[in-house]
Image (cartoon, rainbow, N blue to C red):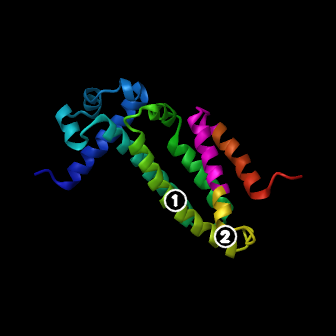
């Protein structure tokens, strides 16, 4: 019987290899055989963990979103102002997603994976909204954000900021360019755009 640590390690190796292969070859061009070679495992072993290429891809998206969630959770549970938490979270997210995620995003057009990816995105949205709402309410109590605005309104604006960060990464901008642009977007979010 395979021990749990080895099983988790193999799963991680397959996900990492799959990420590399999907990034290079796209969803349609990638094969489970190519992923097995990249992972240093037999093709049958890959299928023991993931019954299909689509299942593996959905797991990779889910894994990326979990790591993204951990970044947001870590930054928003740290000490400091809401502004600093937001800036650190956005920059860390850009760093995590990186330019290689742009190549992976091209795979999202495949109908075989749409439902699974959509489900993972909804799970991610639900979990991060709780984090953001807690941080927003705390910042409102501390006087950092307007108490006259509902937390939901601020959350919608914050979601827009994070969507812009993701769009910049997915559009193939460099990490430095993304960081500079998202800094300006956060400034507009926090301080407004009127003169």
Identified at 40% across, 25% down, the residue is 25
Separation of residues labelled 2 and 1 (CA atoms): 16 Å
In the picture, measured across the screen, residue 150 lies left or right of residue 59, that is right
* Residue 172: x %, y % from top left: 58, 32
Q: Mostly what secondary structure, the magenta segment?
A: helix
Camera-nearest residue between 134 and 121: 121
State whether residue 130 is above or below residue 38: below
Q: What residue occupies the far left of the structure in this picture?
A: 1
State whether residue 179 is above or below residue 127: above
Identified at 70% across, 42% down, the residue is 181
Q: Is residue 158 magenta?
A: yes
Which numbered mark, 2 or 1, is in the foreground of this view? 1
Residue where numbered disc 1 is placed: 128
Upstream in sequence: badge 2 or badge 1 = 1
In the picture, measured across the screen, residue 155 lies left or right of residue 185, that is left
Do residues under tags 2 and 1 come within 8 Å of each other at their CB atoms? no
Residue where numbered disc 2 is placed: 139
Mark 1: which secondary structure?
Answer: helix
State whether residue 176 is above or below residue 91: above
Q: Which residues are magenta?
A: 157-176
Camera-nearest residue between 27 and 99: 27
Q: Which mark is residue 67?
A: none
In the picture, measured across the screen, residue 30 lies left or right of residue 136, that is left
Q: Is residue 63 magenta?
A: no
């Amino acid at each position: 019987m395979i021990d749990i640590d080895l099983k988790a390690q193999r799963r991680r190796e397959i996900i990492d290899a799959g990420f590399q292969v999907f990034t290079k070859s796209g969803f349609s061009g990638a094969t489970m055989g190519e992923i097995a070679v990249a992972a240093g495992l037999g093709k049958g072993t890959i299928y023991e963990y993931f019954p299909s290429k689509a299942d593996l891809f959905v797991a990779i998206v889910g894994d990326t979103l979990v790591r993204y969630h951990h970044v947001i959770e870590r930054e928003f549970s740290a000490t400091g102002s809401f502004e600093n938490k937001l800036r650190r979270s956005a920059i860390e997210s850009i760093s995590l997603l990186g330019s290689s995620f742009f190549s992976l995003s091209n795979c999202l057009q495949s109908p075989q994976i749409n439902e699974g990816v959509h489900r993972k995105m909804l799970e991610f949205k639900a979990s991060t909204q709780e984090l953001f709402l807690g941080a927003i309410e705390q910042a409102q109590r501390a006087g950092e954000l307007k108490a006259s605005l509902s937390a939901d309104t601020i959350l919608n604006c914050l979601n827009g900021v994070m969507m812009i960060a993701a769009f910049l990464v997915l559009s193939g901008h460099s990490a430095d360019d993304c960081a500079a642009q998202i800094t300006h977007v956060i400034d507009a979010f926090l301080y407004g755009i009127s003169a």
